[in-house]
Image: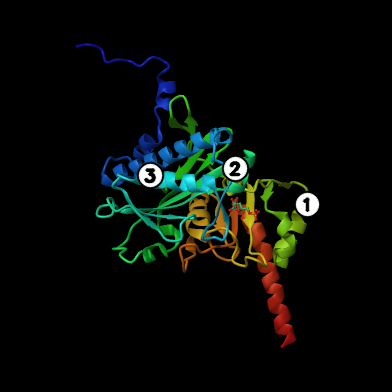
Amino acid sequence: MVDAYQPLDHGLALDRDCTTLSRHVFQQLQNFGPDAQDLSALMNRIALAGKLIARRLSRAGLMEGALGFTGEVNVQGESVKKMDVYANEVFISAFKQSGLVCRLASEEMEKPYYIPENCPIGRYTLLYDPIDGSSNVDINLNVGSIFSIRQQEGEDTDSTARDLLQNGRKQIAAGYILYGPSTVLVYSIGKGVHAFTLDPSLGEFILSNENVQIPQHGPIYSVNEGNFWQWDDSIRDYIRYVHRHEGYTARYSGALVGDIHRILFQGGVFLYPGTLKKPEGKLRLLYETAPLAFLIEQAGGRASTGTQEILDVVPDRIHARTPLIIGSKEDVALVESFIQDKAREREEKFAASR
Ligand code: P6P
């Protein structure tokens, strides 16, 4: 009987390099059934999209027609960057012939996009923001992609995608890809939060942080203080508080994914409250605030509109927006306490005036 082969001591290093995204999904699900196969394949396609976008970003400055504006305005009323269009189409191409995703809903498309060859069997919908923070693209600062996967429910024959108008607890997977000094994919399928770093020499996302837990409190508050004049007094009171107390530091990159990634690892809170111009907030629920809320809750944090958990919000339309307060439990609760105090003060004033 030949002795069983004993891996040498570099077995651990090899094992890590072989912990790719698709393998990690199976490890978490502890089975190779149809649903596990689907989720593993879905994450593999997301990873492919991330690699294609990272490749283009890494040399956009050298490529004719890669940067700048298209001259179009999207359904959000925002000027479209060439990179927005490229990234949007990358996700569509990555899921063609996948047999997995029939419908894609994107920040860049007014209505969902259907992949006909997948629709008879495709059981999933991909919701995504192909390039979040695209104002950073032309100045070579970090940007991200945000994704969310839901089961397709019923026959979506009239492309109204009504089954998508459900709360964020219907998500089966969510995450983001951060295009920074390295490209990092962070995801959850409801079994914790895990980060993978792209190894360009392998062309693979390799596990770099498993079971990431957000600190219960952190020093960072991340908000665009240029909107101070547009905020409700409750938010102004919170900002005055952090301005007057030791232990807080402001960090804001103008790209949601980078700001969230910092808070995921260092703790703190990101805010995009309602403003005079956008009372319901700027950020979109189905492919920005809900996937990030799913992820941050899985990491032990919280995400709210200020008065409601983000994951409980039911949208009335695909491109619905919400205010967002997200991050460490204690810091989200502190912001909410200013909102509650102001509401109570208003109620008492109203009662006294009757
Ligand atoms: P403002 C980028 O346009 C984005 O959607 C997020 O990535 C970012 O957090 C936010 O908007 C920045 O908005 O109004 O501060 O420029």
Residue at mark 3: 93
Residue 260 at x, y percent in the picture? 58, 47
On-image quarter of the C terminus: bottom right
Label whose residue precedes the other's in the sequence (3 or 2): 3
**Which quarter of the figure is the N terminus placed in?**
top left
Identify the mark nearer the N-term, 2 or 1. 2
Label placed on residue 174: none
> 247 or 260: nearer the eye?
260
Cα–Cα gap, marks 3 and 2: 22 Å
Pick out the residue farthest to the right: 244
Left or right: residue 106 versus residue 103 is right
Mark carried by residue 245? 1
What is the three-letter code of the residue carrying label 1?
His
Mark 2 or 1: in front is 2
Could you tell me if the residues under marks 1 and 3 are in contact, i.e. CB atoms within 8 Å? Answer: no
Residue at 63% over, 51% down: 269
Task: Tell me the crowding category of disc 3: few under 14, some 14 to 19, or many 20 or more residues within 10 angstroms, Cα based.
Answer: some
Residue under label 2: 137
